[in-house]
Amino acid sequence: MIVGTTGHIDHGKTALVKALTGTDADRLAEEKARGITIDLGFAYADLGSGQITGFVDVPGHERLIHTMLAGAGGIDMALLVVAVDDGVMPQTREHMAILDLLGMERGLVVMTKCDLADQARRDAVAAQIRELTAPTGLRDAPVLMASTVSGEGIADLRDALSQAEAETAARHADGPLRMTVDRSFTLSGTGTVVTGTIIAGQVAVGDQVMVGPSGLSARVRGIHAQSRAATQGLAGQRCALNLAGDQITKDAIHRGDVVMAPALHAPTTRIDAMLSVLPSEPTPIGTWFPARLHSHAAELGARIVPLGDPIAPGSQGPVQIVLDRPVAAGIGDRFILRDVSAMRTIGGGRFLDLRPPARKRRAPERLALIEAARHADPARALRAMLSVAPVELAVFARDRGLADATARQALDDAQGHAVGAMALSQAQLESLRDGMQTQLSQFHEENPDLAGLGREKLRLALTPRLPKEAYLVLLQTEAQAGRIVLDGAFIRQPGHEVRLTDQDQALWDRIAPSLTGPLRFRPPRVRDFATDFGVDEKEVRRVLKLTQKLGRTDQIAHDHFFARSTTSEMVAILRDVDAQSADGWFTAPDFRDRVQNGRKVAIEILDFFDRHGVTLRRGDLRRLNPHRLDLFG
């Protein structure tokens, strides 16, 4: 369990930690000289539960709220400290507001310096505390008395913390690693060391990790978990990791970075979130509102864009957060907003989408997706999101830090279907299938002379619209099921055949005799038919191309069509020419003489067979390819 101290400056937080653990968390010379906490301090002790409890001691000065926030993000329990002689003070209120915005519901309130107050004063301060915590998640937190001078209440506080340690459930340790960094330094003979709290997953010596958002790769050389040497660190523990890598130095890793499993590396500068604005904020939060964003130990400049009306003090609403630099974040992470002058806390909330669009961000579908993402349970979130639009499953799992098995289980529980990289609901899958049949039926009815609908044209006509890779998987699945036929770049229904209209059939009936009669090896060209029949060349060409799709003709050369039966007959002639050649190679004149054609047309015919692999060419010589002889029946 990690306990974080909070409260006003000089209310005895550091002294309380020392009384509980024996460790002075003020480690800097300046802290000892000035008598105040400036940076985060850490201490560890077994308080009686048999487990090591870690303490994060944070500064209480109003100018050091950003440091307090760096330490408050990964704690399991809050220790709100209020000195009985001062009572509730400004930083007490701000720290309490921050804890509530961070969703903290486990905590103890300790009234320190109780040796300086009588019972009436104690009761008065206790009443102040109850009024302060009443509207927050710590409304039911016990209030204890303590004095580090007289020792009063220290044993009771230790017992309460020991019981809380025993009741602390293990954090999610089966997913990918995420550890927030609050310190980076170098130890002589060891190298670069980073410390922080593991918020998900686990890490072991020898693991390959990545530091985000920079993307630096590193290997874990050593681990201290809860201030003890260990071979692994688990979610919920404070750890020190000794990292090694080509670019790994103490100056390359900063407070707010995240040590993570490499698969999670996907920094972002734009996040959709739900923002709650404190009642103390003087004006509503409008478009492009400037702020400082704090999440775990990270601090960044941000602009806030409400996705609806401006968000009034004391209310909440969806926003898009545009950051001034990339951050390594996860969906569900809590954040705090403070004003750019670092004088006040504005509000806070949770991240809901790490990949939102910059355009159409207020569209109804976008707002519905944000609302759906508010579910903390992955299966419920996925089910709600699938009711709006398909979801890219790998991104869903990565941004939520889910193990592969957990993501698959979420998909099953949400009754979704994987189509390539996309997850679809049953309704979406049926919509695609029905839409595909509707579009093909309509196309065949309106274009009976065409083989099918173009693949991309069909994709753009379907709802929901799938990415190309997932769409191809859907097509292959539908083809295997026999619901569609893939014909090159076209798609058709299984029963569809290209057919000629009555008018086209009439023109074909006039052309066909010239392609199958005595002059079948020297048929007229398109322009000849057009002249003879008084028909536009385009119409003749169009009908002949249709007959080619029907397998009735072959276009041997430009505007020169032969009947398919004639093509098959010429293949038989090639067999005979090949059989009569001494070495299997024959020339164009050998073939020309058999079809009683001119040299130019004979070469055009042989070139056609070359293109289709029926003949193989070597200079002016050709031979048959036995593997393609049946191509034309």
Image: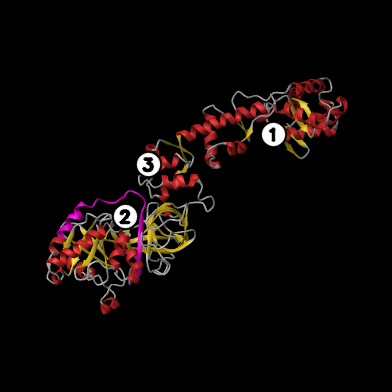
Name the residue nearer the viewer: 512 or 321: 321
Q: Is residue 122 left or right of residue 492?
A: left
Query: Residue at (20%, 51%) from the top-left corner?
Result: 167
Q: Position of residue 189 (x, y in %)?
A: 33, 70
Compute the Cα span from label 2 to label 1.
71 Å
Left or right: residue 207 versus residue 302 is left
What residue does disc 3 label?
A: 380
Task: Identify which amino acid the numbered label 1 is placed on.
Answer: Gly
Of mark 2 and mark 3, the one earlier in the sequence is: 2
Quadrant of the frame with the C terminus: top right
Q: Give the residue number, with chain letter if any, for mark 1.
A: 613
Q: Secondary structure at mark 2?
A: loop
Secondary structure found at label 3 = helix
Tell me which residue sits at (25%, 76%) in the image. 35
Mark 3: give few (<14), some (14-19) or many (20+) Cα within 10 Å. Answer: some
Q: Could one spot residue 314 in this view of the protein? A: yes
Q: Earlier in the sequence, mark 3 or mark 1?
A: 3
Looking at the rendering, the stretch of residues picked out in magenta corresponds to 158-187
| Residue depicted at 56% across the width and 36% down the height | 462
Q: Quadrant of the N terminus?
A: bottom left
Quadrant in which residue 213 is drawn: bottom left
Q: Amino acid at mark 2?
A: Gly
- Residue 369 vs 291, above or below: the answer is above
69 within the magenta span: no
